[in-house]
Image: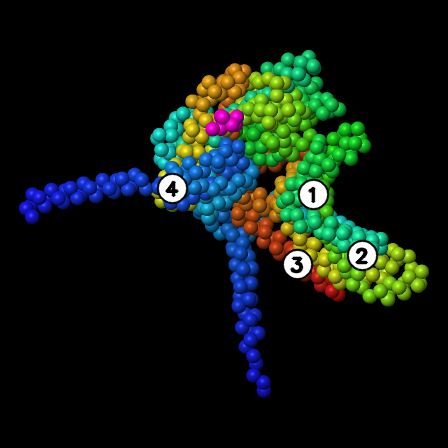
Amino acid sequence: MKPVRLAASLGAAFVLSATVSTIALAQAPVCSAPVKVLAQPRDGLTLLEDSKAEFEKLSGAGFKIDYLNENDRRAKSRADASTVGNYNVYYVDEANVALFASSKWIVPLTDYYPADYDYADFDPGRQKVATYDGKVWFAPLTGGGDLMVYRKDVLEAAGIQPPKTLDELIADVPKLTNADKGMYGIALRGARGSGANVWRWMPFFKAYGGKWFDGDKPAFNSDAAVKATETYLKLFKDSAPGTQTGSWDESTGAFLSGQVAILVESTPLSGMAVDPKTSQVVGKIGFLPPPSPLPGGGYGHGLAIAAKANADDASKKCAGLFIAWATSKENEKRRLDAHQFGELNRTSILSSKEFADIYGADLGQALAETGKVTAVNFWQDPRWPDLGDRWGIILEELIAGTRTDVKGSLNELEAYANELVKK
Amino acid sequence: MPRRSSLPVTFVVPTLVILLTLSMVPTLYAIIIALQNRELSSTTYSWVWFSNFVDLFSDRRFLNAVWVSVKWEIVTVVATMVVAVGLGVLMFEVAGPRLRNLYCLLFIIPVLLPRVSAAFVWKFAYHPLYGIATYPYRLLTGGLIFDPLSKPSTALFAVASVDVWQWGLFFGVIVLKLLETLPPQPIEAARLDHAKRWQIHAYVTLPMLKAPLVSLMFVKMIESLRSFDLIYVMTRGGPGVATETLDMYAFSQGFIESGKVSYASAMAVLMMIATVITFTMLWKRVQA
């Protein structure tokens, strides 16, 4: 064989083998094993399970989601992430993202989130909550702020205008309570937890000018904290039965079953309130931003890539693909079609004509207005769950009446905060 | 001199080694962790020796948890035994053989329910507005609200009632079966002496059943120490800390609130020591 022909043959063989390898690589499945997810129950995730075959086709493997309720999910994911690392994807939230990120239990999401899935399309507020220390850690499954949802019929019968200020709310709530007829002025959260009773208490703390720190020193026992706590306890006298040791489920359940006149809660409530499948008060309700100066509690829950279970880059890419697919525009459109209001996070969906057709212009306007007063109320720090849960227990004791000294309770919290800060 | 067989050693030693490994390894590990300052969020730790134990005694929630655990133990064990003996004697006295079998079947069902399921069922039953257990109160008072799980004074008893519902009825069946195994002569003799029914049981049958009843009581005491799932589902230790037992508080410190696994282990070690001492003393006292 002549040298030129030999070189040409070798060259052709190299090009052919490189092409074949590229094609093989391009067609190689991204995932080699099913993605294990630890989450809390969400309608959107349940719906996602119907499209399992689609993900298998896309990635080459399926997925398995284990569900635990919010507090249990937090406890289990923390234990799993810090020890054995069984799960590839964790459901995280605004309260523990700082802890998970700073402990290196999760990895920055955007490094493994395929660009085609358009992360920038998510609601900016939710992107902000998913960001810690300058990096994005999760893709939102739910989020938003607070809305005041009220019963038009009950307020009209009592001759009361929907409260626009906190003072009006405090004055109106007792007038709206009629326990004999099973009607209560408000529903709050009493159950312990940084994401439970403390979550509802924080807007009052911020409304009265409360700050977590005065310079470098914790300032948890300020006059604002005392006033916020006293107001919360006062309002609790008119809170629906079952909420004293309840949280989101109990307070929204009481409203949706027609026992509560005014509820200031996270935005998914509004979607549930207009859905005849979940609400007995459809057609009787109005929406407004929280009474001024109550800020809305900005929050976001989503999926993050676990560090321990995804030891190599391929596993991280697989987890990233699952998260991208689960939160994709296509899947969000499916949630919109299924009227899952609380599961919508993308601006392209929230501003779509289909959204306006389903939920009406009033709700859209209230959401836009409440966006202006939505704020991050909690202390964005890995130590927040520890501190928030500690305050949650003390606040639950105050609500239950086994403690009565508000100032003393806050002093105790501040002493604990000082210990945490020293660490 | 007969040659000693190695067969017992062959059978016993491997089993003992497995049992010792299974029980001692986690126990020793818990003791070691309790002497350190490990936290879930940190990979670094150091030896703090008895510092966690010292801190526990100035922790008001720990002291409260000790008191709640003692109350829980007393309430559930005493109520279970009273219900079991009362029910067993009642069935023995008033029901015929067929009816007894039916009652036995019915009374065993609650204990067959998984604890978590039972807890959810009763949590809903105690709901102040919809609960079937609170319905009679609403009916009698014209709609007044009674929320037993939200009141610090009633929450522990409301949860304990579920425990007694499961175990008291089951133990009632066991007491009935024990009564049926007794020889009839002493009972007939007492009847001939014109003893009343309660006197027969108080002075004849129950004293004859002292040993098995004591055993039942010990079983219940151990079982009551493991009521974490029931309390966790129904109240999570609340309202406030009214139903926060030692295991609830240890779990809360280790995995819910602060991730202080060493502090939680110190509690577990103290619980283990207290349980061993208490049970040994009680056992010796009963046998004396």
- Callout 4 secondary element: loop
Q: Examine the structure image and report whether residue A336 is included in the region drawn in magenta.
A: yes
Q: In this view, does A239 lie to the left or right of B211?
A: left
Q: Give the Cα distance between marks 3 and 1.
A: 27 Å
Q: From the viewer's perspective, is the residue at label 3 or at label 2 nearer? A: 2
Looking at the image, which residue is at 53% across and 47% down? B261
Q: What residue type is labelled 2?
A: Pro
Q: Which x, y percent locates residue A165?
A: 60, 16
- Callout 1 secondary element: helix
Residue B159: assigned label: 1
Does mark 1 fall on the same chain as mark 3?
Answer: yes
Q: Which chain carries label 4?
A: A
Looking at the image, which residue is at 71% across and 31% down? B129
Q: Are marks 4 and 1 in contact (CB under 8 Å)?
A: no
What residue is pinned by disc 2? B97
Q: Give the Cα distance between marks 4 and 1.
A: 48 Å
What residue is pinned by disc 3? B277
Q: Mark 1 lies on which chain?
A: B
